[in-house]
Image (cartoon, rainbow, N blue to C red):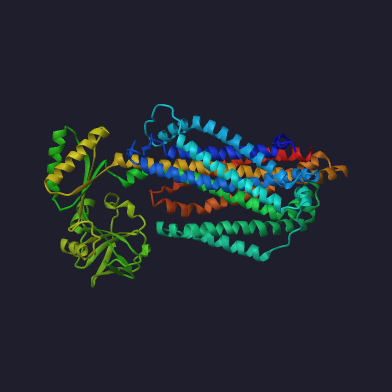
Amino acid sequence: MNKHIYRRLAATNLKKNFKIYLPYLLTVIGSILFYYILTSLGINSFLYDINSKKETFYGARTLCTILKTGSTVSYLFALIFLFYANSFVLKHQKKQLGLYRVLGMERRHLIRIILLETVSLFSIGLLVALFFGIFLDKLVLVLLFQILHQTAPEGFYINTSAISSTLLLTGLVAGLIVIRGVFSILRTKDIDLLKSEKKGEREPKNRFLLAIAGVILLGIGYYYALTSHSVNQALTTFFPAALCVILGTYALFTAGSIAILKLLKKNKKYYYSTRHFISLSGMLYRMKQNAVGLSNICILSAAAIVVISAGVCLYSNGNRSIAQQFPRAVQYSIANQPSQATLEEILETTVTNHKLSYEDMVCIHYGNMLGELKGNTLLPDIPLTINLESFPDIYLLTLEEYNRFNHSSETLGENEILLYDSDDILKEDTLIFKDTTYRVKDTANKECLSYISNYSMSLFPKFLIVVPDTNTFDSFLKSSTGFAAFDGGITYLGFDMNDSVKDVKAFATAYSDALTAQNIANDITLKSDEEDFFYATYGGLFFVGIVLGALFLVCTVMIIYYKQISEGYEDRERFLIMQKVGLSKKEIKQSINSQVMLLFLLPLIAAILHAAVALNIVADALSLVMIVHMPTFIASVAIVCVLFSVVYGIVYKITSREYYGIVNE
């Protein structure tokens, strides 16, 4: 057989089935484009030079790690979705290939046609994606630098390493899809190739056990999400909750949707109207395959809403979170118990030498330790296995220091304490420590924790314990088995400066050196550095979240489109018969709108419900990395839901029009 005929047949198939192949090609282009851009940014020397190990700004290396992780996730997700989309294409291909088989072609000839079609689609997709990717790469880099509050670099570049990685992985995906097509052709009988598009479904039976299981699983997932009250609980229950919700969604869409459709069918007035009869009967007989598609749409929609909302919340809440975690522009953690007078004397000398000024100074002497709470007994020994919920991060203040900071006049008797318990894990009004029982007189004011608490310990509940005197203070710290930050405690010193970042950094280093010269150990924390790191890390997470959310949205749109197009081809002959027996085009359109609207509204409503229920547990999980402002988070979710619904509605209009066009061909 003439070898050129395969190319002509492959090209003819692509042209004749434009409506099927164009969305698939766009999906290929989008998947490659997302992967290329994330990969290119992840290994971009404008962010982090891997050879010299030099960061462009503080946190750039962490950002590159986040971007590389995002590119891996996008690739794995694109691989799964391209296989899913290819199933629609392959189903449509089989009829044409079956015809070629009847005309005398051998299966090896059919395999060659599949190979040529797949290679053509992926080659076009790769070229288009790289063309746009190379030009968009710099634009996206500039946008990323804007998000990170950094100055964008100048100059155009082409990332050859990212191109090589994209070529390699695109070839791998194309090869896997070809192998799948080959196995599908080899396993399918000739007669089944011709009838692949006409293979129908029997009316499904009610599956009450599956429906009950779906309700139980969804209930468990919702319970986990709604009852989360700490970072630790959120991290330990998030994935079980998500798994239960996903499985429950599949079960309810499979069994619950059939039950609902059968109930509607029993409603004679509803079922036997022209508008609903055709669409309802069609959906009922195809509900097995519909259920999987609807579940996928629902889960992807919920994932897109949650991921984008979390990213928006992370980024928009940045200034508030930084201000709460780092309340002063310059902060020191100081050991060796120097007096406040000594610290102020050295500070004044350094300020005078640099001709600068400071304001709003805060100085607090405190102790920090960890312990395990069993009942009302606090154990200083660290167990081999830690239950985070009963393992508080403890901050100690003497009564004198507490009163000085709060401008108060609290009093404590012997073996009395003031206690702030962030997670209410102490259920009694006494605390036993080293055979001494302390009575909790009142709740301590937690304001000082905003200065002295270590935010990296946010997994742990927090205790603020105010003790009567220095002896009690020292007895707590000396009992701690290696987890006291410094013997005798730590001094927090923080103040604001209104000078340039460069001058502040120079001054902070000089003051640190002056303290060291007096044998006063210290560590510096500059808010400006932490802002750079915050935006590099969480700005990167925001960027990756938006990209992955967009990818989820694209995949959702493609699933909806393919679902409607494939069903349009299946329903065309049915509607043609109905037209011949007297059904008008207006009635056909009403029936189509009824079917499409029902199929669209169910996943959207369920997705928004899932996202709303997930608010609590996602907020708790985000508390690991930032202080979450719930009104901002709720507003982010609400805005994303509205925007998502608008896009969803546009897709509904487009796909219903395409569906109507196909059934009327």
Front position in the image: 646 or 70: 70
Name the side, left or right, on which 651 lies relative to 45: right
Please indicate, yes or no, whether residue 12 appears anywhere in the rendered image: no
Residue 149 in which image quadrant: top left
Name the side, left or right, on which 309 lies relative to 188: left
Q: Residue at x 54, y 46 (%)?
A: 304
Residue furthest top as drawn? 155
Q: Residue at x 56, y 40 (%)?
A: 31
Residue 93 in which image quadrant: top right
Name the side, left or right, on which 426 lies relative to 257: left
The C terminus is located in which quarter? top right
Image spot of residue 207 (x, y percent): 69, 63
Residue 439, compared with residue 134, is above or below; it is below
Name the side, left or right, on which 537 lies relative to 441: right
Residue 428 in which image quadrant: bottom left
Image spot of residue 464 (x, y percent): 28, 58
Residue 369, compared with residue 183, is above or below; it is below
Q: Residue at x 57, y 52 (%)?
A: 609
Image spot of residue 639 (x, y percent): 52, 42
Q: Residue at x 69, y 40 (%)?
A: 20
Image spot of residue 329 (x, y percent): 27, 40
Residue 514, compared with residue 443, is above or below; it is above
Residue furthest right as drawn? 581
The N terminus is located in which quarter? top right
Residue furthest front as drawn? 1
Please indicate, yes or no, whether residue 592 appears anywhere in the rendered image: yes
Front position in the image: 14 or 582: 14
Q: How many marks?
A: 0
